[in-house]
């Protein structure tokens, strides 16, 4: 493996349960977290020891999304739908009960948000009016993860029936569907150049799909020992990281799909339990990782 240096900068604490999600804001140094304790917290990487409680919801928060157009934070509240939060005033501005199932992912394009839920549905919501403008249910198993390709007008969704389905961004009409993995698909992301869709699964495999050739498989790597929970790209797009139930974070070369470094507890003071989410920020390129061990780690990766 190439020479890559890992420096652990901070361990952020404050949550009282597993941290399931972290989301960026429009300021590189600010991010948000949601956890099994129902707390939604704002953090500042210039002062990482102090968080601001934005909301305390009765159930676990698996999904958070910062909506750039409104600067509102959208929280997916288990069994109760979505909540719109003004994080600056710490006030809830609206809520919408979409489903009684868990909400696993929220993404946005323009004035719309897209919500993936445990009942297998993908729902499109107008943020300003909280009106449901589209909904499609193509599986009885959970919709787990969403990626949006605005240039192609497509939404990729990974499901717990091992399938990936591609929908039209405007109409939600299904365009492609295929069995992508041998187990639940937990993360989907388009590469920065838009040429491939990267996917990670409970089967521990990382796969690349050729967007311009009908999503034909282009590569496959046995990337972790256990489930791949999430992946994120560096700000310059040259590298990406995956995180896993196996407690590790792995650093990859984007173009070569080559493993460069393993970040774990033994060598780097990594997490003690499953790493659920990663966020590679534009704040000095610092990497964040959130875990079942109730901490968020802040990393500096030197190439």
Image (cartoon, rainbow, N blue to C red):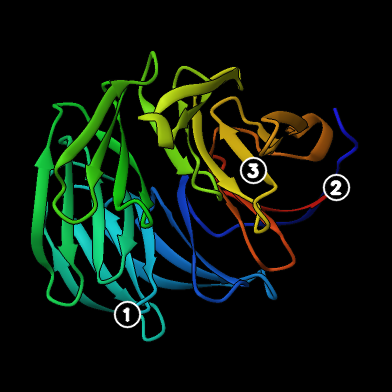
Q: 207 above or below 143?
A: above
Q: Residue furthest top?
A: 182
Q: Residue furthest right?
A: 3
Q: Residue furthest bottom?
A: 89
User: Where residue 89 sits in the image (x, y, percent)?
Assistant: 37, 86
Residue at horizontal 64 percent and vertical 34 percent from the top: 272
Q: Quadrant of residue 260?
A: top right
User: Where residue 291 sits in the image (x, y, percent)?
Assistant: 55, 42
Residue 43 visible within the image: yes
Q: Residues within 10 Å of mark 2 (few under 14, many from 20)?
A: few
Which residue has dot 3 on it? 240
Decide which of 253, 282 is in the foreground and name it: 253
Q: Residues within 10 Å of mark 1 (few under 14, many from 20)?
A: few
Which residue has dot 1 on it? 70
The earlier-in-sequence mark between 2 and 1 is 1
As helix, strand or loop, the secondary structure at mark 1 comes to loop
As helix, strand or loop, the secondary structure at mark 2 comes to loop
Decide which of 164, 103 is in the foreground and name it: 164
User: What is the CA distance from the residue labelled 3 to the residue labelled 1?
Assistant: 29 Å
User: What is the CA distance from the residue labelled 2 to the residue labelled 1?
Assistant: 36 Å
* Horizontal side of residue 120 vs 155, given as left or right: left
Q: Quadrant of residue 145?
A: top left
Which residue has dot 2 on it? 303
Residue at horizontal 21 percent and vertical 36 percent from the top: 175
Decide which of 296, 138 is in the foreground and name it: 138
């Amino acid at each position: 493996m190439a020479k890559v240096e890992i420096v652990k900068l901070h361990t952020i604490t404050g949550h009282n349960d597993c941290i399931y999600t972290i989301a960026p804001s429009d300021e590189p140094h600010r991010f948000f977290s949601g956890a099994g304790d129902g707390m939604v917290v704002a953090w500042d990487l210039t002062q990482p020891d102090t968080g601001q409680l934005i909301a305390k919801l009765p159930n676990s928060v698996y999904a958070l999304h910062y909506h750039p157009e409104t600067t509102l934070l959208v929280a997916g509240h288990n069994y109760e739908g979505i909540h719109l939060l003004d994080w600056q005033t710490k006030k809830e501005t609206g809520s919408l009960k979409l489903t009684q199932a868990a909400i696993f992912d929220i993404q946005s394009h323009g004035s719309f948000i897209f919500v993936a839920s445990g009942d297998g549905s993908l729902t499109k919501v107008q943020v300003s009016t909280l009106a449901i403008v589209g909904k499609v249910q193509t599986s009885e198993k959970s919709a787990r993860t969403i990626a949006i390709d605005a240039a192609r007008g497509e939404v990729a969704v990974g499901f717990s029936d091992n399938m990936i389905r591609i929908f039209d961004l405007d109409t939600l009409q299904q365009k492609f569907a295929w069995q992508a993995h041998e187990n639940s698909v937990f993360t989907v992301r388009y590469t920065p150049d838009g040429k491939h869709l990267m996917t990670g699964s409970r089967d521990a495999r990382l796969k690349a799909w050729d967007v311009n050739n009908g999503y034909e498989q282009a590569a496959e790597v046995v990337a972790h020992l256990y489930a791949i929970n999430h992946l994120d790209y560096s700000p310059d797009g040259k590298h990406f990281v995956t995180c896993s139930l196996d407690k590790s974070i792995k650093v990859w070369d984007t173009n070569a799909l080559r493993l460069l470094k393993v970040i774990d507890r033994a060598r780097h003071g990594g997490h003690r339990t499953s790493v659920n989410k990663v966020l590679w920020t534009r704040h000095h390129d610092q990497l964040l990782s959130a875990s079942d061990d109730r901490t968020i780690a802040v990393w500096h990766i030197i190439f």
